[in-house]
Amino acid sequence: MSVASRRRAAYGTYSSARQDAKSQSRRALIDATCDLVLTLGAQAVTIDKIVAQAGLSRPTFYLHFQSRDGIFAALRRHMVETLDQLYDLLSAIETCEETAITDWIMRMLAACRRDRKLVLTLMRAGTAPGMAFDPNAYYDTVIARLSLRFERFRRARTDPAIHAEALLLLMQLEGAIRYVAVGEDDRDDLRFAAPITRSFIRFVEA
């Protein structure tokens, strides 16, 4: 191997290690923020407390986030992105059979359980700056996503009565998030998913 090749290889290893360290520090800051919100409440959380909890420095914090509200917003954004991906999977579903819908709901529950600490943090933080959330506006984006696959969601975009039904269904679906947040045991997930599946099929087939 030439000297130039060795240098490129060494730089690649260094660059990869640096990226890993950056990802780890970001994750540590987010975990620390969640822990502090859950123990102290969102209003009591400061940047100094976050970096102390994470064992990092203020300059490291500012490499990732511009402010305390910025890290709060990142938490909310991560949850929204997770839900967006799940609803994209639902909008791409090939069949509206009970098994397929139940499988999707179980996947949603599993994803929310993996992010259980984040879910609890968002619930505890409420409308703290950076975490404010307009559910109706978000549900409208979900309806738009699902309208690509389901006619009833397409009609919900223009029919107020159907829109109200769609909102109730989505609130039931995302009630699964709160269910996951308050309990770690997944043994009842399938039983929990069954009535949501029936509600979803009734809505799209009405």
Image (cartoon, rainbow, N blue to C red):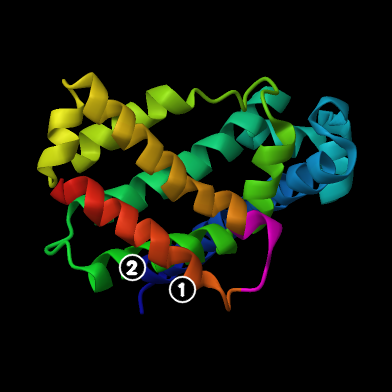
**Residue numbers of the magenta segment:** 180-185
Number of other residues with Cα within 10 Å of mark 1, as a class: few under 14, some 14 to 19, many 20 or more:
some
Q: Which mark is residue 190?
A: 1
- Left or right of 49, for residue 138: left
Residue situated in front as seen by the camera: 72 or 55: 72
- Left or right of 49, for residue 90: left
Residue at (50, 36) in percent of width and height: 77
- Left or right of 106, for residue 36: right
Of the image marks 2 and 1, the number of the one nearer the N terminus = 2
Image marks 2 and 1: residues in contact by CB distance under 8 Å: yes
Residue at (72, 51) in percent of width and height: 31
Where 162 sits versus 24, above or below? above
Where 154 sits versus 177, above or below? above
Residue at (40, 67) in percent of width and height: 194
How many discs mark residues in the rendered view?
2
Residue at (43, 60) in percent of width and height: 108
User: Residue 174 appears at what percent x and percent y?
Assistant: 47, 46
- Left or right of 45, for residue 173: left
Q: Secondary structure at mark 1?
A: helix
Distance of mark 2 from mark 1, alpha carbons? 8 Å
Residue situated in front as seen by the camera: 93 or 159: 159
Amino acid type of the residue that numbered disc 2 sits on in the rendered structure: Thr
- Does the magenta portion include 139? no
Q: Quadrant of the C terminus?
A: top left
Q: Residue 89: name its quadrant.
A: bottom left
User: Residue 164 appears at what percent x and percent y?
Assistant: 32, 27
Q: Which residue is mark 2?
A: 102
Q: Residue 29: name its quadrant.
A: top right
Number of other residues with Cα within 10 Å of mark 2, as a class: few under 14, some 14 to 19, many 20 or more:
many
Instruction: For residue 155, say whether it is visible.
Output: yes
Amino acid type of the residue that numbered disc 1 sits on in the rendered structure: Leu
